[in-house]
Image: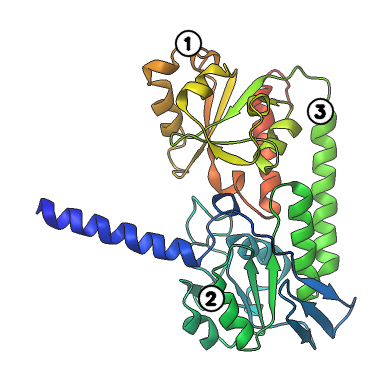
């Protein structure tokens, strides 16, 4: 029985690795390539798409059979278009720990596992990909003459806004996108005004596997917009990295923020960290300021990323009453 369980576990890991190689979970888990985003020419249809490798396609009219191969575009499209214009989304879009649009897309919209045959069977007139999408999949899409829109940058709110505009340009939904972005800018303006003169606590984003984030990530930007000081900036680390527990402890954070894949039990990750003896003298642990955060919006690469700022600000500054 034990042997069978071990075999099942190994198979599950291999299947998971295969799925990760084909589909986007979150941009923060992948490294960007040197590829640039798709360029779109024309304010109205027909529009010309030029991919980073030089492939050019013309969209004669707004696409109506759209395939999304990233959760970020699953989420962006959910706010811009009716579901009947989308024929395929990522297979992980229904997982609450990863997606902000669970339940949005009806069962008739195909949940994709990254297989090129199932994508082609949907006869898409536009496919959204990212810089880290498997190269062979992109090659086959382009070889089949299917227009693709490639998103490449995800390290700041400006990047995410540019991606929303790119998706809107390709789908003919610019007015709706600009309306949404204007509302998000108003949200930022209000948050900045509220937390403008606060003292900045020392904040560390840290997960049990040692992953953290420095400048050049949306999490760093969230911490700063929420009125905190990201202690990782003292180390010279850029982007998402793995650090030792010793280094994390030496930074003496006042507040620790943690991601979690368990939205229904968000305190469990924080409790695990606080129970580690090595952390007992860290200010955040002494004062029980270790907080697990719902990863679906914390690591989002869409408009839902803005949702993280205000909850984080309230954790950092409970003294400010809303």
Q: Residue at x 84, y 86 (%)?
A: 46
Q: On screen, 279 above or below 228?
A: above
In the displayed orientation, state which residue is furthest to the right.
43
Q: Which residue is mark 2?
A: 136
**Mark 1 crowd level (few <14, some 14–19, many ≥20, 10 Å Cα):** few
Q: On screen, 301 above or below 35?
A: above
Q: Which residue is mark 1?
A: 281
Disc 3 to disc 1, how far (Cα)?
32 Å
Q: Residue at x 71, y 53 (%)?
A: 303
Coordinates of residue 244 in the picture (x, y in percent): 47, 28
For discs 3 and 1, the disc positioned in front in the rendered view: 1
Mark 3 element type: helix
Tag of residue 194:
3
State yes or no: discs 1 and 2 in contact (Cβ < 8 Å).
no
Q: Based on the displayed image, in which of its 4 quarters is residue 152 positioned?
A: bottom right
Task: Pick the quarter of the image with the N terminus.
Answer: bottom left
Q: Earlier in the sequence, mark 3 or mark 1?
A: 3
Q: Based on the displayed image, in which of its 4 quarters is residue 140 positioned?
A: bottom right
């Amino acid at each position: 029985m034990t042997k069978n369980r071990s075999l099942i576990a190994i198979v599950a890991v291999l299947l998971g690795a295969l799925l990760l190689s084909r589909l986007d979970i979150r941009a923060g888990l992948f490294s960007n390539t040197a590829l640039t985003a798709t360029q779109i020419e024309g304010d109205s249809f027909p529009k010309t798409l030029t991919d980073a490798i030089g492939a050019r396609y013309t969209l004669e009219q707004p696409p109506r059979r759209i395939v999304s191969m990233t959760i970020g575009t699953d989420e962006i499209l959910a706010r811009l278009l009716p579901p009947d214009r989308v024929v395929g989304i990522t297979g992980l879009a229904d997982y609450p720990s990863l997606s902000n649009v669970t339940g949005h897309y009806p069962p008739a919209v195909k949940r994709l596992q990254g297989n090129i045959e199932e994508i082609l069977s949907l006869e898409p007139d536009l496919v959204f990909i990212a810089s880290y999408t498997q190269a062979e999949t992109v090659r086959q899409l382009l070889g089949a003459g299917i227009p693709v829109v490639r998103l490449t940058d995800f390290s700041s709110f400006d990047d995410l806004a540019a991606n929303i505009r790119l998706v809107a340009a390709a789908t003919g939904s610019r007015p709706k996108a600009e309306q949404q972005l204007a509302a998000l800018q108003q949200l930022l303006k209000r948050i900045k005004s509220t937390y403008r003169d606060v003292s900045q606590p020392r904040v560390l984003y840290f997960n049990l596997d040692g992953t953290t984030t420095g400048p050049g990530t949306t999490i760093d930007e969230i911490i700063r917009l929420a009125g905190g000081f990201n202690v990782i900036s003292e180390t010279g680390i850029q982007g998402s990295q793995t650090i030792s527990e010793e280094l994390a402890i030496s930074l003496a954070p006042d507040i620790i923020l943690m991601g979690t894949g368990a939205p229904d039990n968000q305190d469990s990750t924080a409790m695990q960290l606080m129970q580690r003896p090595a952390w007992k003298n860290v200010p955040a642990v002494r004062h029980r300021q270790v907080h697990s955060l719902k990863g679906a919006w914390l690591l989002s690469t869409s408009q839902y990323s803005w949702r993280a700022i205000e909850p984080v600000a309230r954790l950092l500054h409970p003294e400010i009453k809303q």
